Image (cartoon, rainbow, N blue to C red):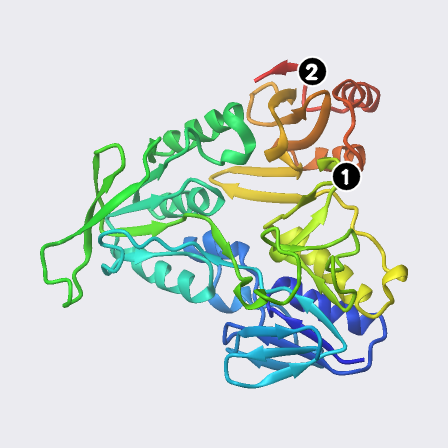
Amino acid sequence: MRLVIAGASLAGLRAAQAARRAGHEGTIVMIGAEPHLPYTRPPLSKELLQGSQEIEDSALPVDELDVQWRLGTPATGLDPTSKRVRLADGGEAEYDRLIIATGCRARSWNGPGAQLAGVHTLRTLEDAITLRAALPTTRRLLIIGAGFIGCEVAASARSRGVEVTLADIAAHPLLPFGPALGERWARMHRDHGVDLRLGAGIESLHSDGHDQHHDARVARATLTDGSTVEADTVLLALGSVLNTEWLTGTGLELDPAVACDATLTSSHDPNILAAGDIASVPAALAGGARVRVEHWTTAAEHGQLAGRNALLEHHERAAHTSPPYFWSDQYDAKIQALGCPALADRTELIELSPTGEKLVAACVRGRHVVGLVAVSAARRLAFYRRQLQAPPLLAELKAALAQEGGSLGEPVGAAI
């Protein structure tokens, strides 16, 4: 069997490793748009920018992996009938089974001033290297977008003494966690000296007065609320765009990610599987609806499962059942989440330490818990992970908590 993996990041690498561990001795071809061997992305917005980690520390081990690398050559097309992936260099990769793991790219912005020097995005290793090189000479950093990347870079830049303005069109940072927790994140950033501008996006960027054709740099920004911000470096953290253009016209269902069943098999072709950011997979916590998760742990789990499943016939394949898990390190807080917090319609605080620094909050939809958020309470995650294999009633979760004991303090049980 010839296995082709389109995407040479975490999900693709884990798929190749899992296939080898499962006994696959045939050819594995790894196609990657970037010229690098696989690396891990979480440090790009944290340790790498803070200076506590070097570039080479981001590399993932591949020395023992027997694959054919096709790096710096993105996939540009797919013919499922002839089972061929077309490549940007004009070549092709023929497969018996294909795993799609092409992920996402940073969302761009093409407004006035977008081409000025000093304007960055952060998705790739090159992006992180360029931004890190700019920070020592940056007096004021403007970050547009208060999602995970924007908030993590704000914290990293503040640790280096850079003045930071963080702006977002939303009413609070980390929108998927809801307004109650969002207020907590807003206070956290303001307490660390971040100039937080909410309800305001980017309107235009303005130069330092030099000819824009001669390396003019950004000097200030106008936001959508009419205010201006002085900045000599700008990070556009506007989310991501799926790398699915190469799948147009293939017959695969895109919603907009690759629609899969629980075994990560694409909905219309049992020879094609998907893993990581680009896979849309049914989730028990979403009532069986498909969800897409852009986080490290899911990419790793998807890759491992897809690599094993690709060696089997469809009816033999295992389902992915683990609830999503993700984390974000900001200042001295470790934010961890389980499940699908973005699906909740309210948030309820269920554990709180006496000092208020540690907490666990339930993300509730109707009467069921669809997600949990913990702040600096990593030891509590194992208990909650067991409860979230299927969406429990909030009352059931509270009863289990009371029986389990060992909480951060007295269970609270009040909306926040």
Q: Please state which of the two labelled residues, at mark 1 or mark 2, is closer to the viewer.
A: 1
Q: Residue at x 71, y 57 (%)?
A: 302
Q: Position of residue 214 (x, y in %)?
A: 14, 68
Residue tagged 2 = 410
**Depicted 321 relative to depicted 80: above or below:** above
Q: Position of residue 44 (x, y in %)?
A: 48, 57
Q: Position of residue 329 (x, y in %)?
A: 53, 43
Residue 50 seen in this snapshot: yes
Q: Is residue 341 left or right of residue 73?
A: right
Q: SS for tag 1?
A: helix
Under circle 2, the secondary element is loop
In the rendered image, residue 389, in percent from the top left (x then y), is placed at 80, 38
* Quadrant position of residue 405: top right
Q: Residues within 10 Å of mark 2 (few under 14, many from 20)?
A: some
Alpha carbons under labels 1 and 2: distance apart: 30 Å
Q: Tell me which numbered mark, 1 or 2, is placed earlier along the sequence.
A: 1
Q: Tell me the quadrant of the picture where the C terminus can be found.
A: top right
Considering the image in quadrants, where does the N terminus appear? bottom right
Q: Is residue 185 above or below residue 118?
A: above
Residue bearing mark 1: 284
Three-letter code for the amino acid on which mark 2 is drawn: Glu
Determine the residue positioned at 42% across, 60% down.
128
Is residue 376 visible to the viewer in this orientation of the structure? no
